[in-house]
Amino acid sequence: MVKPIIVIITGQSGSGKTVALRALEDSKFFCVDNLPIALIDSFVSIILKNKEINKIGIGIDIREKGFLSEASNVLTNLKDKYRTEILFLEAEKDVLLRRFKETRRPHPLGGDIEESIQIEKKRLAPLRETADRIVDTSSLSPHQLRQFVISKYGMLKLKKLMTVTIISFGFKFGVPQNIDLLFDVRFLPNPNFVPELKLLKGTDKKVSDFVLNKSVAKVFIKKIKEYMDFLIPLYIKEGRSYLTIGIGCTGGNHRSPAISEKLHTILKKYPVDLNIVHRDIC
């Protein structure tokens, strides 16, 4: 019998937990927010009595120290019973301060915002250590975070296949915090300097042909294919759950999307849940 999937979203206030939970809800998860960690096990048991529900998303916001003392046991027991993954969201202090200022909302812990951020970070440290995936959302817009969560869990199957996500991006907008493998393709000729290609995207055939038909690109594709043919089977054999591959160029609009789409095609032959995200494409 296949275990149900439980995704727990937690992290710092202002890091995007609400956005992430709504993305899970859009991905057909049964979701609940602000659930005390001591109540999670009972809640899951009750919900799963409905045989039509097999994917649950839970947002937890630890504000009282009492809950933290129970966190380890509760989450360990949950992982023993179900396929459970903890997604921890965080962001740099300056980014959190800016977000609270822009929304004009007080920090949940009240008082001075900067001091509250530090207190919350310290309280959440034990929970962060148990996380399966930690994502820094400092450089992500709400839309990009939503895309990321959907790419990870939107097509999640009820069997243990590795999920491979390819993210194209522009270095000038920052390197994604969650990638496992990074390939820099700024050595390829840039379509941005070709007038008829400048306003097109890397997913357009004209741009893709321009990038992929260059001799240096053909050599790169050959080598990256050989690397993936070596690496992917080993990761699958190891039982790895996730692999995130970042492909970066200068602006993330031409070269990296073109290479990412080609890599996406190459990896289709493997028994993995395959996703692609163009983070910075205009």
Image (cartoon, rainbow, N blue to C red):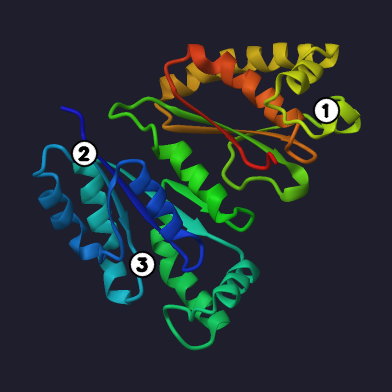
Q: Residue at x 43, y 21 (%)?
A: 272
Q: How many marks?
A: 3
Which quadrant would residue 219 be assigned to in this image? top right
Earlier sequence position, callout 1 versus callout 3 = 3
Q: Who comes first in sequence, dot 1 or dot 2?
A: 2
Residue nearest the viewer, comparing 64 with 163? 163
Left or right of residue 91: residue 3: left
Q: Are marks 1 and 2 in contact (CB under 8 Å)?
A: no
Residue furthest to the bottom: 111
At 27% from the left edge and 75% from the top edge, which residue is drawn?
66
Q: From what the image shows, is residue 148 above or below residue 8? A: above
Residue that carries the numbered disc 3 in the rendered image? 61
Q: Measured along the vertical axis of the image, is residue 160 above or below residue 253?
A: above
Query: Closer to the observer: label 1 or label 3?
Result: 1
Disc 3 marks which amino acid?
A: Asp
| Horizontal side of residue 202 vs 214, given as left or right | left
Query: In percent of the image, x 58 and y 16: which residue is there?
Result: 265
Q: Amino acid at mark 2?
A: Asn
Task: Tell me if residue 187 can be seen.
Answer: no
Q: Return the x and y of residue 39 as percentages of the image width and height.
A: 18, 62
Q: Residues within 10 Å of mark 3 (few under 14, many from 20)?
A: many
Residue 70, visible in the rendered structure: yes
Quick check: 268 left or right of 282?
Answer: left
Residue at label 2? Answer: 54
Q: Which residue is mark 1?
A: 197
Instruction: Give the SS element for disc 3.
Output: loop
Ranked by sequence position, the earlier of labels 2 and 3 is 2
